Image (tube, rainbow, N blue to C red):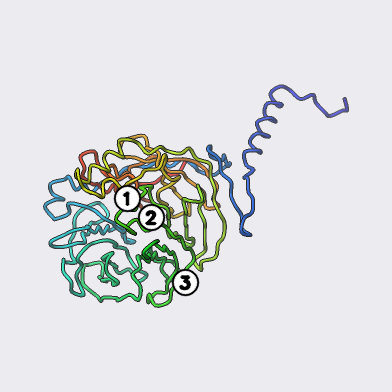
């Protein structure tokens, strides 16, 4: 043996093997499709050195419709919500005989309610969407009407905006545009569009289309209860679209509608339970002709909704039940689309499992609506910590 060279010890050989294994774990599998990068993820997350992948949630408070004080102010149900930069929470109801929007401070204390029921410029018949626009005003929309009611954050009516199309806004974008969803009903099919529109809701750019059968095309047509087939969300500088007919694939676009990459992942299908089928059919009385038209697939689609946190991580809600009865499992991807971990937290619609409940991240907190076993809904607020 040459001078200065020492025979490797067993300990050093073990370190060398571990280093090689660690190095292998850093190699992210990729391919190309439609001239863009495709990230290939497996059932187990990638281990990336120095990248926090474990989400720890510390519950701070909740707004519970089962609480007597909450019911007394008129908030007995929750549809959607948004959070302003000061941490104030704005919740909209689906039905109301009085006010639709309820404002709470950053500690969950009730402040005020506004937006009354009616057909006038400052009113709604049904509450569907509420979110803050680019100017920090509240935009509220009845899903059946081509108009918005805009209020300031103190509940003062500002104006009404009439739309050229019956669109549903997904959310405002950081470039002062909006991500939107539009559905056009034809006798034999539903044409579903996702796109971008300008701040005045005048110019529309479609970026994705998916046609699905019209379940009401005839009185005898079969209706497949298979969950949402088009999943979408707006992030800080990205748009996310998932077409479940493509399997576990998430298309990532920039704010101009250009396809940047695709995220793919292996997954274990979740069976549609007999309990869900029976609960679903129980909504229709015996003898209802509609009751006999439903079909159910063997398994649910791979995912149900997307959430992006402030660092650009993507949390993908799956149909897998979480660690507790009101929780679902979420897959976690880093900003480059690499699967890095999983988390379980409360976001289940216990009675209608195929529908997503609102969930969002704001300023290091996670806000999530979920159904309690009692049937009441609760908005829980968690402090997020990554380890």
Residue 356 at what x, y percent from top left?
34, 50
On the picture, is 210 further left or further right than 368? right
Q: Secondary structure at mark 2?
A: loop
Q: Secondary structure at mark 1?
A: loop
Q: Residues within 10 Å of mark 2 (few under 14, many from 20)?
A: some
Q: From this viewpoint, which residue is outermost toward the top?
A: 10
Cβ atoms at labels 3 and 1 below 8 Å apart: no
Q: Which mark is residue 41?
A: none
Q: Secondary structure at mark 3?
A: strand
Q: Which mark is residue 357?
A: 1
The residue labelled by disc 2 is: 363
Residue 46 at what x, y percent from top left?
56, 40
Front residue (pair 15, 222) = 222
Residue at 37% x, 41% y is 328
Front residue (pair 113, 296) = 296
Residues under labels 1 and 2: Cα distance? 20 Å
Residue at 26% x, 55% y is 79
Residues under labels 2 and 3: Cα distance? 30 Å
């Amino acid at each position: 043996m040459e001078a200065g060279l020492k025979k490797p010890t067993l300990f050093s050989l073990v370190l060398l093997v571990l280093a090689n294994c660690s190095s292998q774990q850093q190699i992210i599998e990729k391919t190309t499709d439609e001239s863009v990068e495709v990230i290939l993820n497996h059932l187990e997350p990638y281990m990336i050195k120095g990248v926090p992948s474990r989400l720890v949630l510390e519950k701070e408070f909740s707004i519970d419709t089962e609480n007597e004080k909450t019911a007394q102010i008129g908030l007995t149900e929750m549809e959607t919500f948004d959070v302003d930069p000061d941490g104030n929470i704005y919740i909209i109801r689906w039905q109301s005989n009085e006010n639709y929007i309820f404002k709470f401070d950053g500690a969950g204390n009730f402040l005020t309610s506004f937006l009354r029921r009616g057909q006038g410029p400052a009113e709604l018949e049904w509450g569907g969407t509420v979110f803050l626009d680019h100017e920090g005003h509240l935009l509220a929309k009845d899903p059946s009407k081509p108009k918005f009611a805009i209020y300031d954050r103190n509940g003062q009516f500002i104006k009404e905006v009439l739309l050229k199309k019956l669109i549903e806004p997904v959310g405002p974008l950081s470039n002062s545009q909006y991500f939107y969803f539009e559905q056009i009903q034809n006798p034999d099919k539903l044409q579903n569009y996702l796109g971008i529109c300008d701040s005045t809701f005048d110019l529309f750019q479609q970026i994705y289309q998916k046609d699905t059968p019209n379940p009401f095309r005839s009185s005898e047509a079969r209706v497949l209860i298979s969950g949402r087939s088009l999943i979408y969300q707006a992030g800080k500088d990205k748009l996310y679209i998932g077409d479940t007919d493509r399997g576990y694939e998430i298309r990532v676009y920039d704010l101009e509608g250009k396809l940047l990459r695709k995220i793919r992942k292996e997954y274990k299908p979740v069976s549609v339970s007999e309990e869900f089928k029976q609960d679903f059919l129980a909504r229709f009385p015996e003898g209802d002709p509609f009751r006999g038209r439903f079909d159910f697939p063997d398994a649910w689609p791979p995912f149900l909704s997307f959430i992006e946190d402030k660092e650009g991580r993507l949390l993908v809600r799956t149909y897998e039940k979480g660690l507790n009865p009101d929780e679902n499992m979420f897959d976690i991807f880093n900003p480059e689309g690499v699967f890095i971990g999983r988390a379980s937290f409360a976001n289940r619609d216990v009675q209608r499992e195929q529908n997503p409940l609102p969930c969002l991240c704001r300023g290091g907190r996670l806000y999530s609506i979920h159904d309690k076993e009692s049937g009441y809904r609760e908005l829980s607020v968690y402090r997020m910590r990554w380890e």
